[in-house]
Amino acid sequence: MRTLAALALLAFASSVSGAEAEKIDLFHAGKGGYTIYRIPGIVVTKSGTVLAYCEARKSTSDWGTIDILLRRSADGGKTWVEPKKIADVPGPKQRNPVALEKKLGAKDDVTYNNPVMIADKSGAVHFLFCLEYMRCFYSRSDDDGKTWTKPTEITESTFDPFKKDHAWKAFATGPGHGIQLKSGRLVVPVWLSLGTGGGGHGDSVTATIYSDDAGKTWKRGEIAIPNTDEWNSPNEACVAELADGTVMLNARSPSKANRRLVVISSDGATKWSKPKFDDALPEPICMGSLLAIPDKKLLLFSNPDNLDKANAKTPPAGGTSRDRKNVTVRLSEDNGKTWSAKRSIESGFSAYSDLVLAKDGTVLLFYERGSDKRASYGKLTVARFTVNWITANGRR
C-alpha cells in the first residue's frame, strides 16, 4: 500500500511539473465540409462542462461563408461530443457594403463571425456573435450548451450608439471569451472599424459592451483605446478582472512598437487609463488571451511570442506583421506589471488562442496550429496543463 501511495504521489508530482502538455485536436482543416477552422474560443460552465467554439469557414476568407460550431466536453476536456452549428439568423441576409465594395468574398456568402461566450456564476452561458461584421446577436443556454435561445439582435441598442464617436462600417465582438465581474456585470471586448484597408478592418478602435441584467440588455462602454498615430488601429482585445478588482483590456494593434497595448478600468466600461505598450509582450499582430486566477492572484497571457519574419530581405518595419508561430503562455504574479515565467506550447506555426480554467484547476488553451497536410491553420487544438507547467523551466 505504501508503495502504491508513493507511486501515486510521484505521478501527481510529474503531472504538475515539467511534463509535456496534453494536446487534443478538435477541428481539422478540410474535414466536416469546411476548408479551415479558425478563431477559437473556450469557456467552462458552473458545472464544469467545457464549451469550445470556432468559425468553420467554407473558404479561407474572413468574409466568406462562415458558420459557428461548438463542441462540448463533460469530463474537463478529455473527450468531446461531435460539432454542432449554433448560430442561425432566419430570413434573407444583406452583405456588408464594405465586403461588396472591396469584393471580399462572394455576393451570396453569409458570414457569421467572432463568437464570444461568457460562463455565468448562475450556471447560464451567454453567447454573442456577429453577422457580416455589422450586426450582433445575443443568445443564452441554461443546459451547459445543449440548447440555445432564439438569437436577439442588439445592434441598434448597443453598437449604433458608438457611431457618434466612431462612425464604424464594420465591427466584431472578442474574439475569444468575455468575463463576468465579481459585481455580476458581463463584459465583452469589441472593436469597431471605418472599413478601410484591404480587408475592410482598418482604422479601428477598441471598447467593451456590458450587461448588468444577466444578458437581457447590453450597453456600450467608452472607447478604451482610440486610433492615433501612436496607438494605431487597436482591435481584437482580451479582458480579465484582476485580483484587486480592476479590469484589464489587452489589445492587438499594428502599432510601430510591435507590443501589446494595455488599459485599466475600475468597472470594465468607463474611465479607461491612458494606453501603454507592455514592453514584455511582443506583438506579431495576432489575437491574444488573458486568464485571471483570483484565488492564486495570478494572471496568464497567451499569444505568438515572435517578432521574426522568415525570408524577409530587410528587417520588417515597425507595425508590420511577423510570423505567427511559437504560441507561448506567460505568468504574472503582480497583476500584469511584470511577467515572471513563460513557456512555449507550440514552437511551429500557431496563431489565435484562448485560455480558460477547468473546474479541477487545469489550464486549457484552445489554439490554432499547423498540421502535416496544412502548414498554417491546419488544426484547432486544446492543450491541457497546470500552472506549474509554466514555471517548470524556472522564473526569470
Image (tube, grey):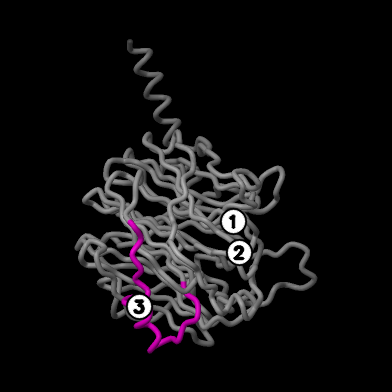
- Give, as a three-letter code, the residue at label 2: Gly
What residue is rendered at 26% in x and 53% in y? 120
Which quadrant would the N terminus be assigned to in this image?
top left
**Closer-to-camera residue (93/215):** 93
Q: Determine whether label 1 and label 3 are within 8 Å by CB.
A: no
Residue where numbered disc 2 is placed: 64
- Give, as a three-letter code, the residue at label 3: Glu
- Residue 154 highlighted magenta (yes or no): yes
Residue where numbered disc 3 is placed: 156
Q: Secondary structure at mark 1?
A: strand
Q: Secondary structure at mark 2?
A: loop
- Give, as a three-letter code, the residue at label 1: Arg
Mark 1 burial class by Cα count in 10 Å: few <14, some 14-19, many 20+: many
- Bounds of the magenta segment: 150-171
Establish if 254 lies above or below 87: below
Q: Determine whether label 2 and label 3 are within 8 Å by CB.
A: no
Locate residue 332, reporting x and y percent: 39, 57
Q: Which numbered disc covers residue 57?
A: 1
Q: Determine whether label 2 and label 1 are within 8 Å by CB.
A: yes
What residue is rendered at 54% in x and 45% in y? 381
